[in-house]
Amino acid sequence: MKKVLESSVTKKIISLSLTFVIVQILIYVNIINSYLQATLATICINIILAVSLNLITGFTGQFSLGHAGFMSIGAYVCAIITMRMSTIQGFILGVLLGAIAAAIVGFLVGLPTLRLQGDYLAIATLGMSEIIRVIFLNMKITNGAAGLSPIPQFVNWPWLFVFTAGTVLLISNFLKSSHGRACISIREDEIAAEAMGINATKYKVIAFTVGAFCAGIAGAVYASYFYFIKPDLFGFLKSIDVLVIVVLGGLGSISGSILAAILLSLISTYLQSFAELRMVLYALILIIIMIFRPQGLMGSKEISLSMFNNLGNRLTFKKGRT
Amino acid sequence: MEQFLQQIINGISLGSIYALIALGYTMVYGIIKLINFAHGDIYMVGAYVGYFCMTFLKLGFLPSLLIAMVFCTLLGVTVEKIAYKPLRDSTRIAVLITAIGASLFIEYGTMFFVKAGVRSYPDMTGLLVKQFRFGDIVLTMQQIIIVITTVLLMILLQFIVKKTKIGKAMRAVSMDKDAARLMGINVDSTISFTFAIGSALAGAAGVLVGIYYNSINPLMGIMPGLKAFVAAVFGGIGIIPGAMIGGYIIGTIEVLVSGYGNSMYRDAVVFAILILILIVRPAGLLGKNTREKV
């Protein structure tokens, strides 16, 4: 029994369900009112986006500026499906198809462009997301620049939690697998990794596709929660928003991305009415972090439960000695 | 046919502006391998300086152009000193992110001071509004001025790069930074000088766009900046004549797409060209393929 309690899986389940229950109670007693719930949704969506971009940029080392493009695919597919099939099944189908569509586009775009190095890839992915935006702007089914509304709202806290925790678990488990290790080795040194027999292009495309899939989920959740989408929401600046979160949290740290997503979502909610100031602040964060702490808040470290355990052990150990 | 010629004329005018911006991208990339995202915003600042000179100081076209160029030079060098110089030895991804930060800072800093709204250049008078008609083809004085200014600046640039001592230093640094340093070249000041020249050209492009399209706003630099980068990649990044040719070609293609196709798709077409080039010939039109060394 003790063994079961101490295994990391059980601990994960306990801490996750605790988070869920606490927030659920806070919503129930109305401490988290409907305004704060919107912030909560933003936080969750940003966590999904940041963690998935971190997989591409932080762990695999491929600089992508096209995350908003994948997000918009998920959002539009989910919106179009749920507007025609306004049931919970329709919503699940929409999220799934949206994510798959984003993954397919990510695969098709990634295959040729991931052969490019660093900054060329950044521009190519940026161009890709602009092309996607222009296509949505001109299609009939997406209603052009006016966008789609009202999209039936299905997403509530349990759904948000399922998708966010699901994405984080998916990506952190992926990184612990041999595929994930291969991705990290590509970041460290692509040529050395290839010399060790790792097919760099293959793993880059895998990371890119998984990242796009999760961005698609984020987009679908966004569409279903905020019930209004238009192409301009998914422009260059949205990609930058996600990038700022990843960089601030630390390229290569999932818990860093989560922390930064919470922090920046709260800041931007408070600075909502000073849009220019918010962007100036973002710009300063980017520059200052790159100059003084290029590894971000967390570097490539992770916050884990064992860290607290170690801390506790050390404290009790000291007490025992004195 | 006449419509086609008209489109070509418009394309060359727009292409001149892209070429001027692309030169800055290509020189900076050639020397420190950085996509200077803030470059498009320096062009925007140039447009605003020109606007203030013409509207509030009531200056003519030429003095405004010169003031904008000087101001942008200072701005470009300041950005380089504050944001890029401390990162000379860090990873390329870090510098790229800083460049994005600098770009956002200039955009929204400007927006904070001048507000987000669109402003229009004062009405042009005298020589600037002259039009020449050849049948159905209209050639405006503004277009002539844009092309002439661009060509003059390009000749000046070629002269600086090819004939002067600092130009030689620039070429040396772009070939091999360490070897250049060993030869007694001050690498830091050469890099600053490159930023200065590039920014001056971007400032000139800003004023030219102001008199041509008449309306400016704080976010106007993003798209032309990206397209100018596409132009630089098209011609072969790091190669000065390549940027000029690329600028003219991208400008003409864009005008033709909006003239004959759907103007909504013109941005998409430019980026599609970029992705195609990167896949088919990453070194660009005039570039040479270099092999990767371990």
Image (cartoon, rainbow, N blue to C red):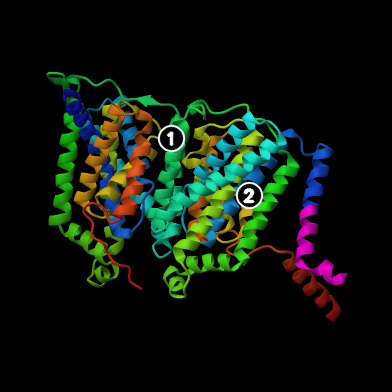
Q: Which quadrant does the C terminus of chain B fall into?
A: bottom left
Q: Position of residue A307 (x, y in %)?
A: 72, 67
The reply, left or right, for residue A259 in relation to residue B174 is right
- What kind of residue is marked 2? Ile
Q: Residues within 10 Å of mark 2 (few under 14, many from 20)?
A: many
Vertical relation: B144 (above or below) A311:
above
Give the residue number, with chain letter if any, for mark 1.
A134
- Nearest to N terminus: mark 1 or mark 2: 2
Q: Magenta segment: does it hold A33?
A: no
Please, which chain is the residue tagged with disc 2 on?
A
- What kind of residue is marked 1? Val
Which label belongs to residue A47? Answer: 2
Decide which of B152, A217 is in the foreground and name it: A217
Q: Residue at x 40, y 44 (%)?
A: A127
Q: Residue at x 29, y 50 (%)?
A: B233
Whether residue B8 is visible here, answered yes or no, is yes
Q: Magenta segment: does it hold A9?
A: yes
Q: Residue at x 39, y 39 (%)?
A: B222
- Specify the quadrant of the image occupied by residue A180: bottom right
Q: Position of residue A148 (x, y in %)?
A: 57, 28
Q: Number of labelled discs?
A: 2
Instruction: Characterize the magenta stretch by its predominant secondary structure.
Output: helix
